[in-house]
Image (tube, grey):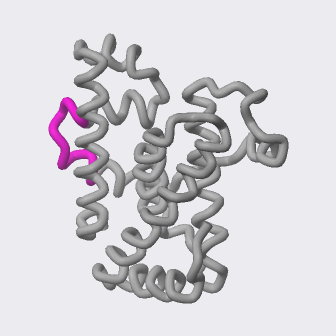
Amino acid sequence: MIANEGELRGLMRASLEGDASAYRAVLDRLSRHLRAYYRGKLARLGRNPSESEDLVQDALMAIHTRRHTYDVDQPFTPWVQAIARYKLIDHLRRTRASMADVPIEDAGDFEAQDDHVGAESAYDLDRLMARLPEKMRRAIRYVKLDGLSVAEAADRAGMSESAIKVSIHRGLKALAAGISQGRGR
């Protein structure tokens, strides 16, 4: 999935030491790789490639909130690949993908996984989310964090389904911008 381990690992190490420009570079490079990864996986599953954008944002958010768990003495790309794979699995489960639609070589990815997030990550996410307007925060929380469908989130929030989708899209875009500018730290 990711081509240059050494470069990415060096950038991630520098970002963990407080280099905001290195962090922006890591997120920029990862977003390109993740987009290609998700488009390829979704195409193999016969899914809409437009789903890849939400997955890229979900993965970048997870990388951001879990960055403190990365061990700089270990390879970086397997850590990113694990997060990306789990986000794809979560997405397919949430969108009710049938196991019959999953190629046999990917079926092992559906085993139960411990996706524990530390208190520090939750705090970072809360700080980032607090910068969003309430409407966007609710839409993201209901669909991306609580796992509700767009229809369920619309009912709960008293909004239309299209308003929920727009709020999620704009909110994730704003969160990604906040992350890349180092405001979640």
Does residue 100 lie above or below 8 as drawn?
A: above
Q: Nearer the viewer, residue 96 or 113?
A: 96
* Quadrant in which the N terminus is drawn: bottom right
Which quadrant is the C terminus positioned in?
A: bottom left
| Corner quadrant of residue 145 | top left
**Residue at image location 36% in from the left, 20% down from the top:** 153
Residue 44: x %, y % from top left:
67, 43
**Residue 98 picture location, percent across and down:** 70, 25
The residue lying toward the viewer, choosing from 129 and 44, is 44
Instruction: Give coordinates of residue 49: x percent, y percent.
Output: 49, 42
Q: What stretch of residues is rendered in magenta?
A: 128-136
- Quadrant position of residue 94: top right
Is residue 164 found inside the magenta-colored segment of the image? no
Is residue 185 placed above or below 110 in the rendered structure? Answer: below
Q: Is residue 180 left or right of residue 145?
A: left
**Residue at x 58%, y 77% (from the top left corner):** 3
Prevailing secondary structure class for the magenta stretch in the rendered image: helix
User: Which residue of the protein is positioned furthest toward the left in this rendering?
Assistant: 133
Q: Is residue 135 magenta?
A: yes
- Residue at 41% x, 29% y: name it: 143
x%, y% of residue 129? 27, 46
Judged left or right of residue 53, residue 1 is right
Say which of 166 and 174 sits in front.
166
Going 37% across and 70% down the picture, which residue do you hit?
28
In the figure, 103 relative to 93: above or below? below
Figure label count: 0
